[in-house]
Amino acid sequence: MARGPTRADDGEGGGAAPRSVLTPSVPQDIGIQAQRQRILEAMAKSCAEKTFSATTIADIVSHASISRATFYKHFANKQDCFYATADTFLLELQGAAAVAYTRSGDSTVEMVRDVIAAVLEALAADPDQARMLLVEAPIVDAEIVRRYRGFAIAALEKLLRAGGVAGQAQANPEIAFGRAKVLITNYVAADQVEDLGRLLPDLVYIALLPYAGQETALAQAKASR
Amino acid sequence: MSDAKDAERPKLTSVGDPPSNLHLWKLPRGRHGLPRELVLQSQRERLLAGVVRVTATKGYQASSVADILKEAGVGRETYYKHFKDKEDCFVAANDALVANLETGVKGAYEQPGSWPQRVRRGLAVTLEWFAASPEIARVMMIEMGTVGPIASSRFRETFSRFTALLDDGREQIEDAPDLPNLSSIAGGAVFARVYEEVALGNATNLSHLLPQLTFELLLPYIGEEAAAEERAAAEAEQAEEARASQAQP
């Protein structure tokens, strides 16, 4: 997909030389990346409006204001585009979590709380993408959910182990992830993303339950209010 | 329109009060089952069963009203007497299925016993119900999400209706935790797991999950120790059933 360091004015036709003076250092890559990003946003938007299964390439093309040919330069088909959209947003969430983690200098439990808060904020900031990842992805391919569940659990476990919080609790982490997903998805699907922050105590409880047990998880949820 | 619907309602619930009747809604395995007209009495019922079968075969988006008519053996005019469009028919079918499941779950949950015991029995019925028909499970869980906004909000309503059954737990249990979303946190464990198994095509195995899901469902209300006791009860009952079915081939 990358086209190397060709300039934005290349191929614009014969005598368009002055443009290269006005925009001398914008590699075509940036234009292509922006175009790709527009397609991903269009995919999320159309999914939010009419679900993934009802979305057509025509919908995406019209939302992104690009040609059909341009769409196929980036993606093989609708499914391919959906995976890219989900993955890109997932990376964004991971980024938000990582920033919150490095900023949070407090106890392990507080780190968990800050990371969860940051993810909720990132979800709330982009309702279409949040809906796509939480509501549509499980319908399109259950494997996507298993993949991001894997990421989330591994990260949480690492954090808790490092802080000595992970003990021998009996609840299953995958089930805990399912609880969190259902709780958040119900808000996102009901267009209540702005209220996601309210779920912080519940999510602290859910995250700690498999590692610290019921009693500690409840106490920390109370402390997160 | 809504009047006609309401007039039909009582019949609808009778479609499958005993869960055994639900086999009528499943995809026929070979076409040698009972003559459909004997059992699906009203045209409306035929249409509801038809939309479920067509959706299970082709997916909601790819199926048309014409497919439903063909499957149900009902004319277009009759169809539009009952339903506004495809979505209307699909949502009505989902409602009928949910009503059937709900009747079963409530029946088990309302039997005398300790609260954890009653929750376990309600859960057992839920898992068996979905396991009994993977196609129906798929239509209700996965296809329901591809329909549109009306179906999506109906889906959430259904989830809250089922978790609301658990809210009973707050009164039944001494010092139940004070989390506002407690019932959703508890019920979400079951929902997410069932959803995943259905999506992956493993619905027939759902009953095996009863012990683990009993534990996870009760845990937020009663803590590890008491939830583990109920899990052990579920394991013991399953072992007993396995012995009984071996003894009687």
Image (spheres, coloured by chain):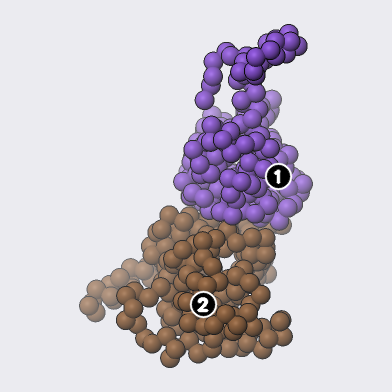
Chain colours: A purple, B brown
- Looking at the rendering, which quadrant does residue A40 occupy? top right
Q: Which residue is mark 1?
A: A127
Q: Amino acid at mark 2?
A: Leu
Which residue in the rendered view is the most extreme toward the front? Answer: A14
Nearer mark to the viewer, of 1 and 2: 2
Rendered position, B11 above or below A61: below
User: Is disc 1 placed on a helix, strand or loop?
Assistant: helix
Contact between marks 1 and 2 (CB within 8 A): the answer is no
Tell me the residue at 56%/75% (across/down).
Answer: B93
User: Is disc 2 placed on a helix, strand or loop?
Assistant: helix
**How much space separates mark 1 and mark 2, taking CA atoms?**
38 Å
Residue A23 percent coordinates (x, y) = 72, 13
Which of these two is toward me, B127 or B144?
Answer: B144
Q: Which residue is mark 2?
A: B69
Rendered position, B212 above or below A154: below
Mark 2 Cα-neighbour bin, 10 Å: few <14, some 14–19, many ≥20: some
Residue A165 percent coordinates (x, y) = 56, 36
Tell me the residue at 57%/13% (across/down).
Answer: A5
Tell me the residue at 54%/19% (across/down).
Answer: A3
